[in-house]
Structure formats: structure tokens, C-alpha cells
Amino acid sequence: MADMTVYRARKVITMDPGRPFAECVAVRDGRIVSTGTIESMQPWLTRYSHEIDDTFAGKIIMPGFIDPHTHFAFSSSYLTMHYVGPIDSPGPQGINKGLLTRGEVMAKLQEAADSDPDPNAPVIVWGLDPASQGGNLHRDELDTIKTKRPIWVISYAPHFIYLNSVALEKAKIPDNTNVHGVMRYPDGRLNGQFVELEAGRLALGAMREAIAVRGGADGIKRMADIARQAGVTTTAEMIFGKGNFENEWKLYSQIVPADDFPLRMGLVSLELGLHADHGAGGADFLLKAMKRSSDKLFFHGVKFLSDGSFPAMSLRLNFPGYLDGSNGIRNDIPWDELHERMLPYWKAGIQIHCHANGDEAVDATLDALARLQKLQPAFDHRFTIEHYCISTPDQARRLKALGGCASVNNYFVHYRSQLHSNEGFGPDRSEAVARLGSLEREGVVFALHSDYSLVLVPLHPLTAAWAAVNRVALDGKTVMAPGERIGVERALRAITIDAAYVLGADRKLGSLEPGKLADFTILEEDPFEVDPMALRDIKIWGTVLGGKPQPA
Amino acid sequence: MITDRSETEEARKVNPLAGKETLSMLMGIFEAARVVPRTAPSLVLPLTIISGFLGAGKTTLVNRLLSDPGGRRIAVLVNDFAAVNIDEELIRFQSGDTIGLTNGCACCSINGDLVNAIQRLVDRDEPPDAVVLEASGVADPRGIAQVALANPAMRLDSIVTLVDAETFPERLRDDRTRSTVVSQLTAADIVAINKMDLAGKRQRSEILGLIEASAPGRTLVETSHSNIPAEVVLGATGRASSTFMCAPADHVGGFSSTTRSWQHPLHREAMLQALRRLPPYVIRAKGIFSFEGEQDTRYVYQRVGTREYLDALQGSSAPHAGSELVLIGYADHWNEPELAALIS
Ligand SMILES: [Zn+2]
């Protein structure tokens, strides 16, 4: 077998601004030896045995895409949850319209059942109001929904749960059960209704089990496949150790290092979890845990939170606040204590990531960073504000002055900004969501991320780049705050080298340079040549991870 | 489509808060699917939920339990979800084992944090003897109860709902608070009425009538300053049942107890039937039983109001024929001969 493989391509985009383009990449032992042309590589090729691989001859090689903020371990169930309630209710995809009749409810149930072809995927529907929507559902009625999938319907107030026959089978309710609230037809047959706590526990226990068997290792592998098909080679789990640190480590360390797992993964530990387990010793514990890291699975940084979520409209805003005069939630640690909790990590040189969605929370986060800088000044600390959805130009300038970075969920520009113009944040802030132009003008390093699967946007870095370049809203034509658009090159940086930077991994990842890990995204078209509006439509052949091709 | 007007009117009556509670409950169950081990639990912890509207005295009760837990190690989970709940500050400085629930990950709500906090308790080298959860003052406690019970290592001991006698009738009349207050009452196994000492005779019977109309058949405890002993809220421990007996029986909020023991195995059905006929002034019953024909197994029995729990006692290796029963109840109506006749 040859020492080196030389991949020839239509074009190699290195994301090394000094040597931006090439024709081939030479790889040895999973790492890059050289980029250039066959001719330019001759000094290597004459010294090492090699083979030339033309699999990508007509394609584009880019550094593997990096999504630096994901949540693969979270159940994706609630993204696929369906709503049948009688009043309008905000959901991840926008406002769920209230349903007025039983007929509409049944049609929605059928639609929910048809939404996933997997016969094992639970159908979880909530919101039924028996008083206004035709009474309680029951098993025989639910069985008229044509599906092999188990169905759980939860009433609008958390009192009733209704199961179809498939779900009842999963719940394994003994026929002779005398648990209060397990309801029956007059002939004694279970009618699928569960009322109040003890009975609800049985029904929801079966639902939890149905979700759990699809979570864990299987769930993470499914999500990794979604990422691979989107051209991603590295993600970072942004809330690690929320439940049990060692159990979660066991799960990841069994899955991620395996040869057939298609991604590298960073694990960013939640400070709340470290604090609960180790008190003031959290930073020391994390430093020790970092010794377990490998190139495929590595501990990186610590995560704090300062406010609520963008789609759930619980982020914190400065004046004039929300349209309805309300405001969102602060998170966990009081804002004026945030820097104290961050200090041990700051001192230990552990990179800090702090969730801040709204401008008031961004201020609080910047205040914490300013206090840290006063207590112990530092360069190259890469303190990163996560999400950075609603911000102001002065905040970008201050972030630069304090030496911080941003990891931005900019998918919302497309998917939600118009919606929140009327609902929640008002027109000004909704239009200017994800101010990437301001960050670029101030010279702040920033990355783009999806937050998948906690919010309902695709995990698809080319879509993030597309949204960054075009800022086209959901109506397909309105450009939201055109002054916050960025160019294609900057957008591609934000899903490769600059994303590696905010993960502290730019020595090894993010660009195609000698010595770096041979992670590529293989595209069918050149993102610099296509119409910027077609960026997200570029076909992705697949990825190469550590020199090993992984077709999508 | 033409919309039937009456239907829209009906739909408008839906309380959007209830929807939020349901969503939050579902988030909690999803989180439980992620963090709760799928193996059978090796222990079962009793859970007591303290419910009641804002200002009803939940924090005072929690503080009392912490300062006088009756020989138990209790862990208290405090819900600081509502911005209006400034009570958490008060609790934070108690010496006991208090865990302030937080919004956890902002994306997945307080209930995600509850799931994690409970799992941490279960995973402890020395788990607590009892878990107390303070529910939000503005919520139906069922949602959070359902989330706590998503962990198979938890057993619901009881829901105790506190009522402020002074403000209760008004809360019940007010459209904005009625449904929450009623849901807290109907969820309760024990309704504890605070400030009854300040109420006159007529007010007292009005309040009792209102509670009976909203949530019939609940076990009622009248008290002031949430002065209810741990034995009533959490049930009896073997050793501590005398600590509250000195409470003057003629005083509102006084409680009595009695203990029975048997050296011979009991007839299972006869005993259970008798316990189901206990008069309403008995708030709690706790027993350790040996039944005829099952000498190798001992059972633990708990009864609160109408909620009943019977299970084989974990880790009871040495066969032991003895049985014991502790009854706790309301001193005002305590009738020792009646109890003696019922449970012999
Ligand atoms: Zn996140």
C-alpha cells in the first residue's frame, strides 16, 4: 500500500487565505501533507510512494464543515411533536393554528401519523380540549387513524392521556389492573384513556420508554448521519454532563471513537452540572477530564447560560422590550455573580461559552467578560457568546474590545425573523437578528451554528452560509437588514476555519494546510461560482474524515 | 369555513397557562427519556409535593420541614420558576439539603432540571429518606408531579396543598385565579388550611364548605403558620412519632397518633379492608406488615387520604413475624376507642 493518497479535484478550496485554491490534496496517515498541483507536490511525490485518487476529479474539495453548537443527545421528540389544541399556540415552526372541530383534530392526527414513515416512531400530539373539541378521545376512535405507529395524545391541560391500540400494547397494562384512572369500555376492555397521576404515569412511562429506545446511542448515530449528509465533519455538544457526567461520557466514548461514526465531536460541559457535582472544584475536574480527549472525541470548554430562547420567546430584551410589554427569563446564575462562577475556568485557561440570545443578556454577558478581564487580564481567551441573536452594533464593538468571539444562530434570519416582527420582538429587532455584518466590521471572529436539535432549523451549514449572504426571509423575497449581510468567503470561514477557532481547534481543523487532519467536505459545485441564492442547493457528495471517504 | 360561534367562545375559555404546563411536562418527560437509566431502580424514594397558591405558606412549611425533619434526611427541591416567587431567597439559607431548581437549559424548561436533580438524588451514595418538592404557586401540581414520577425510583407519597384562609374565598371568586386554585385542591391528598385561627366560626364553615364543594373528600388539616409536623406531611418514621404528641389536643393544629403492634402474622385482606375504612380524621397510616402465608416477606404500607401504597419491603432478609401500624390524625376528632375497634 502506498504511503500517500493524492486526491485530485476540479478545485480545492483551502480556506488558507495565503494559498486559497489548489488542484489536489496529498494525505498521509489521516493528515494533510501538501496542497497544490501534481507538479508543485513533486518534492513529496518523489520521496514517498503514492497513489492518485480521482474519485473527486469533477468535484470541489473544501475543509470539512464544522457546526460548533449542536445537541445530539437531546431527544428530538419535541421537534416532531404535533399540536391539536383549540387556541393558537406558538411552536418551533411558527404559530400552530387552533383547531375548532373534531374533524380537524382527526385530520391533524392522520397528518401527524403520516409525517414519519418509521413505524416505530412514536406519534406525540398535545392540546386536545375535550370541552370544546368533541369530548374525550378513546382507543377505537384513535384506531381509525391509519398507521402502525403508537399514538399518544395529551390533553391541553395535563390531565388526560389517550393511547391507540399500538401504544396500549407498548404500555403493557395488565388487563386486571386496578390502578385508579385507567379507563375501560363498558365491556371491561381498556379504552385507551388515562386520567390523573397514577394512570398518567403508566401511559407517559410507556411514552418515555418509546422515546428512550430511539435516543441514546441510536439517536446520536441518527443525528450524526444527518450531519454527515450535510457535509459536516465536526460538531460540538454544547450541553454536556447535564444529567450524569460519567454516564454521558460512557455513552459518547462508546459511539464516537468507533471507525464507522462519521464525525469528530467536541464536548462542552455545562457549568451547572459541574457545579452540582464538584462545587468550586469544577474547573480542576474538567482539566483532568480533558486528558481523556482524542482527535475524534475531545473535551473543550465550559458552558454558561444567561437567558432564554429565541423561538420560545424567552430571551431577555432591553427597552422597549417585547411587543406585549413582557420580558423573557434570566437563567440560573444571577447576572452579577456570573463572572464569579466563570473565574475558576478563566484562570484555568478553559474556554468559556456563554449562551445569550437577547441584547439585555448580551450586555450581562459582556459585563461578566469585562469583570473577568479586570480580575485577571487575558489574551486569546476566546470567550464566546453563543447564539448572539438580538444584539446592537455597540455590543459587537465591545465584544471586540474585550477579545471575545461569537457563535451565531443565523438560521433564524430566514426561518423566523418575519414571524417575530408581529409576535414577540417587534420589527426592528426581528429584522436585525444575527448581526453578522456588524461583527465583521468590528473584526470579531464568528461562527455559524444550528443548535440542532433544540430548535427547528435544519443542520445544514450551507443553508447557514446562504442565509448569512442573502438574509432572505421566509417569503422568499424580503431582504432583512441588508447591511448585516456578509460575503461568501466570510460565510464559508464561519462554517470552517472560524468555527474551528471558536472550538479552540484551529490548529488541527478548519482549513486544508499541511499537518492538519484530513477532513473534507466534497461538493458538486463551487460555492464561489454559483449564484449566491443557490448556495444552499449545492449538492453534497459526502465527506472525508481523517483521509477516509464517507459518501453521503 | 363557517365557524360555529359557540365553539369559538368555548375555545376562548381555555386557560393558556394550562397549555404551558402541559408543554413543560412533556419537555420534562423527554428529558427523563434521556437521563433516567432504563434498568429497574434499586431503591424507591417517597415524594411529597407541596402545592398551594402564592402566599399560602409553602415556604414556611418547607422551612419547618428542614429545621425539624423528624429524624429523616430529606431533600427539598424548590421551584423558583415564577419570577414572582421571591421565597427561594428565604429557603436558600437553611442548613438542610435544599436544591434550588433552575431553568436549567433555557431551551428545555424547569422540568428538565427537575429530572436531572432527581436523578442526582437517586444516584447519591447516601440518597435521602424523602424528597419534598415545592410546586409553583401559579401551577397545577400535576404537571410537575408527573415529571418527578417519570423516574421509576420515585413513589408519590402525597400532594399537600396549602390554603390561606384569609385570601382563599377571594381567589376562588376571581376568574383569573379560580382554575389554578381549584386544580391545586383537586390534586391534593391533604389540604392544609392556614390562618384558621384568625377565622371566625362562620368564616370557618364557609371556607370548609368551599373546599368541600371544589374538592370533596380531601383530608383537611387546620393550622396556622404552616405549623404541621413532619409526621403529617411526610408520614411517620418508626422512631419520631412521639415528638408531636405533646401538641395540645385542644388547639387548632394539634395532632394525635397511635401505634399498634402484633407479634403474629396478619390476615392480609382483613387488614387492608380495615385500613380503607379509617375515619377521615386519620390523616396518615404507615405500617410494616407480615401477612399469613407469606412469612418470608414483610410489607410496607402507606396511606394518605385515599392514596394507598403497599409493597414488599426492600432488603428485609431476616424473617420476622412482627407487624406495626402508626396512625396519625387530627386531635380534635381523635377517637381512640373507635380506632381500637376498627384495627384490632
Ligand atoms: Zn444550545
Image (cartoon, coloured by chain):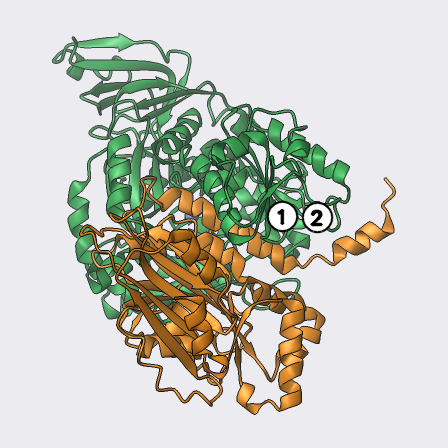
Chain colours: A green, B orange
- Dot 2, crowdedness within 10 Å: few (<14), some or many (≥20)? some
Asked if residue B176 lies left or right of residue A317, the reply is right
Q: Is residue B86 visible?
A: no
Q: Is residue A276 visible?
A: yes
Q: Relative to B60, is B113 above or below?
A: above
When asked about the image quadrant of residue A219, the answer is top left
Residue A459: x percent and y percent? 46, 35
Residue toward you, A6 or A282: A282
What label does residue A155 carry, if any? 1
Question: The residue tagged with tag 1: helix, strand or loop?
Answer: strand
Pinpoint the chain carrying mark 2. Answer: A
Asked if residue B32 lies left or right of residue A26, the reply is right
User: Residue flagged by tag 1: what amino acid is it?
Assistant: Ser
Residue B215: x percent and y percent? 62, 66
Which residue is found at the position 56% from the left and 91% from the top? B198
- Which one is earlier in the sequence, the residue at label 2 or at label 1? 2
> Label 1 near label 2: C-beta < 8 Å?
yes
Residue of label 2: A130
Name the quarter where the N terminus of chain A is drawn: top left
